[in-house]
Image: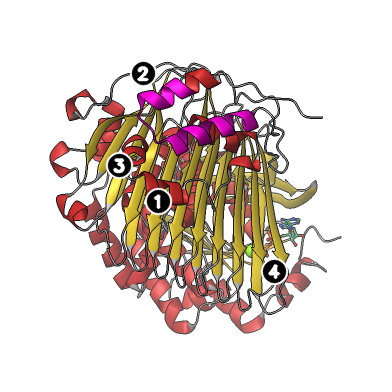
């Protein structure tokens, strides 16, 4: 039996929303088509987490505020992440889907790099967006949430790096959410052959917590020899229910995609992260840290799917659960027939800080090819009382000893993150959330 | 300043309902080095662990005071901050926490907010102590005891001892697994601390460490209590003749404790 979902936006509203934003016709039509599907398709079924009663449909959808670009008007929380205006290099900030600040280095523009908000991208680079938008990495009709996403997308950024261009400074996006707004954020990244870039995104909540839903999709496309580092720190408030799906389509030979994800939302969250390794010799690396607290329920599923020969996929996920938080960590390394000499490895570890917290780590290897190597490790446990004894026997208080052990537990992931600013933000956030 | 003191009377300790210590008593004061000797399985580590407050060991009766205060009334960290130190026979490994971070946190644990050890002071001190113990620089940045060899763990315990400068230290088999050169280095570190402000209980079942650290008192432990005490000459006699003569003298058949 399927329960039909009803989204609080009808065809007319969607049409006028699209018209206000001067979107190309193909996009308006795609929205309308997706909207009709969203009500008919089923919800996704993340393994071991029941999400049928979660709030994916109750939110407001009026575009609030005009697009601006003023550093002074940014909130304190955003400015803390941005730093001083003089030091800003490549940055887009948005609040409830509308851009509040944009800066791109002139030399990148000259080299043909596009770093702009989705709204502008659809107007100015419609053909390019059309070529990739929800084509291969994520499809509209996977389930009701991907369809709803395609129908209602109202924020996000588009990044295009032409062949051979190496973007040295990170491209940063900050997505602020406020009130009951339904955030349908889409991030589309295209890295042409032998290009490289680092992209960092932050999701954060402002104001008091009203019930809301976030439906986030990121798609990354990599051609031959391209190298992309994708860092994210998700930090949405407890009242926001989040569906976030980040996927990489590693098409190119020897291309490399690195994910560094800090999954720090306070609300119920389904997070999927998938890397498709098509290109021969391509590499996918996923590192995630997560913290659960309060009564939140989260499901983190990471897939690496090997199609190409000599592909290498690495998954490393560590999570800390406190209070009555529940989290499922699924890791799936799938090696398709023909992906000879592929290597898939994964580790999931969960540390539980209380009797009421729940954690589950499920490493899965699905292998359809003989000539491969693969391995997995998983653990779910509590703090070792003997470690506590050892640390306390040197004078550390119980709290301080616990703090060190948790820090140490997350360090193999956080310390190895390939993007320094994400690393620092996470140290900070972990400090605030765990202790 | 009064000398530090650890006084233990008629201590009984159980693990998993099995009584291991059966009436142990000792007085250790600043300036004194006591060697506690005895074959394996006689309760030496149980004594050390119980005094530090190991969660698996239950004190069923007896008392211990540390500088006049009831030791068993204090939490593990309070005992440490009061100046008690245990170099463990089997120290834990803590992944992701570097030795340097850990030792610095420990040094700052009993210091006021405005009196924390600065990074420079810390580096100077740890460089000095590591030099003395002939420890490689990389040691600081390795995760706490993770993947350390037996000998490296022992040196790390002594490094912590030298960094924290406790009032009374219990060293549990700090010599096992060390070759003679390492043994000398460790002995040098401990001898450095010798003063009226420092008392020490050296637990060992070999006499050889005592060639380099001259004890003031030697106690032999069997069946969970001290069965014989003497001066340094007792250690010498044990080295030459083993433990059998004591067992015969006291009519002990099995010196071990807690056997099924
Ligand atoms: N963790 C433990 N669980 C069960 N029994 C133990 C444990 N630790 C020690 N014992 C018992 O206590 C006895 C004394 O152990 P221990 O204090 O370690 O002796 P020593 O240090 O003198 O070799 C052991 O022979 C064993 O029977
Ligand atoms: Mg022992």
Residues tagged 4 and 1 counted as in contact (Cβ below 8 A): no
Regarding mark 3 in the picture, which secondary structure is present there? Answer: helix
Q: Position of residue A297 (x, y in %)?
A: 63, 32
Residue A87 occupies which quadrant of the picture? top left
Cβ of mark 2 under 8 Å from ligand 1: the answer is no
Q: CA distance from mark 3 to mark 2?
A: 22 Å
- Say which quarter of the image contains residue A39: top right
**How many numbered marks appear?**
4
Q: Which is more foreground, mark 3 or mark 1?
A: 3
Chain where mark 3 sits: A
Element class at badge 2:
loop
* Vertical comparison of A82 with B257: above or below: above
Image height of A328 relative to A365, above or below:
above
Q: Secondary structure at mark 1?
A: strand
State the extent of the magenta-drawn residues as a range: A15-38
What secondary structure predominates along the stretch shown in magenta? helix
Label 1 environment density (alpha carbons within 10 Å; few <14, some 14–19, many ≥20) = many
- Can the viewer see residue A339 in this picture? yes
For residue A124, the mark is 3
Question: Of the residues under marks 3 and 2, which one precedes in the sequence?
Answer: 2
Q: Separation of disc 2 and disc 1 at Cα?
A: 26 Å
Query: From the viewer's perspective, is A164 left or right of B16?
Result: left
- Residue visible at 35% across and 61% down in the picture: B193
Q: Decide whether residue A332 is among the magenta residues.
A: no
Q: Residue A35 magenta-drawn?
A: yes
Residue tagged 2:
A64
N-terminal of the pair, mark 3 or mark 1, is 3
Which residue corresponds to mark 4?
B40
Q: According to the image, label 1 marks what residue?
A: A189
Give the crowd class for mark 3: few <14, some 14-19, many >=20 residues within 10 Å: some
> Which image quadrant: the N terminus of chain A?
top right
Query: Which numbered mark, 2 or 4, is in the foreground of this view?
Result: 2
């Amino acid at each position: 039996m399927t329960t039909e979902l009803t989204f609080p936006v009808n065809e007319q509203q969607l049409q006028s929303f699209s018209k206000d934003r001067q979107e190309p016709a193909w996009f308006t039509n795609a929205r309308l088509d997706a909207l009709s599907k969203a009500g008919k398709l089923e919800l996704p079924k993340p393994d071991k987490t029941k999400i049928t009663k979660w709030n994916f449909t109750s939110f407001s959808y009026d575009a609030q505020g005009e697009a601006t670009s003023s550093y002074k008007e940014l909130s304190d929380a955003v400015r803390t992440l941005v730093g001083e205006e003089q030091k800003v290099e490549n940055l887009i900030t948005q609040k409830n889907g509308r851009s509040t600040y944009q800066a791109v280095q002139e030399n990148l523009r000259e080299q043909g790099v596009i770093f702009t908000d989705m709204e502008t991208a659809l107007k100015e680079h419609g053909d390019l967006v059309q070529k990739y938008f929800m084509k291969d990495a994520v499809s509209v009709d996977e389930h009701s949430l991907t369809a709803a996403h395609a129908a209602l997308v109202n924020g996000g950024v588009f990044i295009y790096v032409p062949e051979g261009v190496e973007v040295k400074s990170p491209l940063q996006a900050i997505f602020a959410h406020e009130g009951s707004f339904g955030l349908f954020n889409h991030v589309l990244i295209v890295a042409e052959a032998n290009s490289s870039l680092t992209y960092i995104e932050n999701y954060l909540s402002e104001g008091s917590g009203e019930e809301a839903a976030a439906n986030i999709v990121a798609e990354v496309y990599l051609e031959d020899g391209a190298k992309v580092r994708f860092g994210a720190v998700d930090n949405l408030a407890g009242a926001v229910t989040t569906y976030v799906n980040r996927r990489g389509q590693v098409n190119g030979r020897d291309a490399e995609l690195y994910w560094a994800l800090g999954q720090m939302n306070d609300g119920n969250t389904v997070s999927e992260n998938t890397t498709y390794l098509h290109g021969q010799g391509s590499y996918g690396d996923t590192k995630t840290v997560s913290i659960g607290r309060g009564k939140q329920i989260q499901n983190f599923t990471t897939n690496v799917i090997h199609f190409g020969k000599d592909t290498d996929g690495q998954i490393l996920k560590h999570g800390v659960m406190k209070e009555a938080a529940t989290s499922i960590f699924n890791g799936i390394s799938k090696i398709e027939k023909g992906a000879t000499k592929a290597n898939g490895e994964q580790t999931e570890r969960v540390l539980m800080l209380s009797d009421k917290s729940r954690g589950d780590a499920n490493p899965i290897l699905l292998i359809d090819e003989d000539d491969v190597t693969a391995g997995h490790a998983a653990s779910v446990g509590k703090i070792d009382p003997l470690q506590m004894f050892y640390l306390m026997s040197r004078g550390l208080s119980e709290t301080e000893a616990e703090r060190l052990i948790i820090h140490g537990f997350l360090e193999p992931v956080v310390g190895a993150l390939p993007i320094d600013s994400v690393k620092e933000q996470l140290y900070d956030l972990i400090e605030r959330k765990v202790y | 300043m009064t000398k530090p003191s650890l006084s233990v009377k008629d201590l009984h300790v159980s693990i998993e309902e099995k009584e291991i210590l059966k009436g142990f008593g000792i007085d250790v004061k600043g300036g004194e080095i006591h060697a506690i000797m005895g074959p394996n399985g006689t309760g030496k580590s149980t004594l050390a662990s119980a005094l530090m407050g190991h969660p698996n060991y239950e004190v069923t009766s007896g008392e211990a005071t540390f500088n006049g205060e009831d030791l068993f009334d204090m939490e593990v960290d309070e005992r440490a901050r009061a100046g008690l130190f245990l170099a463990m026979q089997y120290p834990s490994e803590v992944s992701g926490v570097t030795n340097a971070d850990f030792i610095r946190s420990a040094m700052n644990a009993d210091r006021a907010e405005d009196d924390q050890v600065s990074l420079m002071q810390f580096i100077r001190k740890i460089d000095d102590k590591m030099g003395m113990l002939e420890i490689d620089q990389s040691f600081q940045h390795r995760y706490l005891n993770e993947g350390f060899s037996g000998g490296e763990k022992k040196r790390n315990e002594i490094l912590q001892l030298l960094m924290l400068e406790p009032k009374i230290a219990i060293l549990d088999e700090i010599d096992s697994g060390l070759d003679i050169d390492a043994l000398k280095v460790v002995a040098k570190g401990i001898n450095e601390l010798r003063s009226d402000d420092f008392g020490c209980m050296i637990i060992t079942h070999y006499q050889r460490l005592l060639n380099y650290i001259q004890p003031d008192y030697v106690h032999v432990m069997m069946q969970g209590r001290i069965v014989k005490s003497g001066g340094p000459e007792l250690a010498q006699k044990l080295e030459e003749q083993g433990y059998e003569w004591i067992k015969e003298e006291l009519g002990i058949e099995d010196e071990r404790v807690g056997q099924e």
